[in-house]
Structures are given as structure tokens and as C-alpha cells.
Image (cartoon, rainbow, N blue to C red):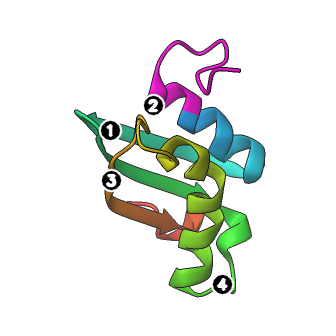
Amino acid sequence: MSLLGNTGTIDRAMETAIREAIPDAQDVDIRANGNHFTVRVVAASFEGRSMIQKHRMVLSAISPFMAGDNAPVHAIDQLVCELPSEEA
């Protein structure tokens, strides 16, 4: 089974995976530069969690895209996890 599913692109597949893992995500923004990515997620479920806990929530959702020798995602260069009240 392909990681892409019906989305066609890695960034859209990653967004789908994040939204499935964090259903209250209000905004998911993924930017690609080759196989390096910047990810920004805004979700109320981050309330009361440490930065490490927030990052783990997102990274666990996208870990299949970083697994194996031929993984489509080589690196997450920046990961921003915000509450809706923190959104710029």
C-alpha cells in the first residue's frame, strides 16, 4: 500500500495523516524543499502539553513517511505547534 493513498503528493498525504491523528487541527501547513519539510500545526489539543509532547503528536502521525532507506521525507527542518490563541 502506498503512503500517498489518493492524495498524490507527500505533503498532502502528510497533512491527511496529521489531521487523522489530531482531529481538531484547525490549520496544517506543510512546505517542501525537496525531501526536507517545514510543518506548522494549529490545534486546541496542544493545550497544557509541553513542546516535546506537541512535537511527538505530530511526528508520530508522520513517522511512516520517514521510515526506511527510501523514505520520502528525509528531514523536518522546522516543526511549529501552536494553540489557536497563539496563531499569528
Q: Secondary structure beneath disc 2?
A: helix
Residue at the disc numbered 2:
11
Span colored in magenta? 1-13
* Callout 2 touching callout 3 (CB < 8 Å): no
Q: Nearer the viewer, residue 36 or 2?
A: 2
Q: Secondary structure beneath disc 1?
A: strand
* Callout 2 touching callout 1 (CB < 8 Å): yes
Answer few, some or many: residues within 10 Å of disc 4's Cα (few below 14, many 20 plus, some between 14 and 19): few
- Distance between mark 2 and mark 1 Cα atoms: 7 Å
- Distance between mark 2 and mark 4 Cα atoms: 25 Å
Magenta region includes residue 76: no
Answer few, some or many: residues within 10 Å of disc 1's Cα (few below 14, many 20 plus, some between 14 and 19): few
Q: Earlier in the sequence, mark 3 or mark 4?
A: 4
- Distance between mark 1 and mark 4 Cα atoms: 25 Å
The residue sitting at 52% across, 48% down in the picture is 67
Residue at the disc numbered 3:
75
Q: Amino acid at mark 3?
A: Ala
Image position, residue 64 (x, y; %): 60, 45
Q: Nearer the viewer, residue 14 or 65?
A: 65
Q: Secondary structure beneath disc 3?
A: strand
Q: Nearer the viewer, residue 32 or 72?
A: 72
Image position, residue 13 (x, y; %): 57, 29
The residue sitting at 53% across, 70% down in the picture is 55
Q: Amino acid at mark 4?
A: Arg
Answer few, some or many: residues within 10 Å of disc 3's Cα (few below 14, many 20 plus, some between 14 and 19): some
Q: Earlier in the sequence, mark 2 or mark 4?
A: 2
Residue at the disc numbered 4:
49
Residue at the disc numbered 1:
31
- Horizontally, residue 41 falls left or right of residue 80, namely right
Q: Amino acid at mark 1?
A: Arg
Q: Residue furthest left?
A: 33
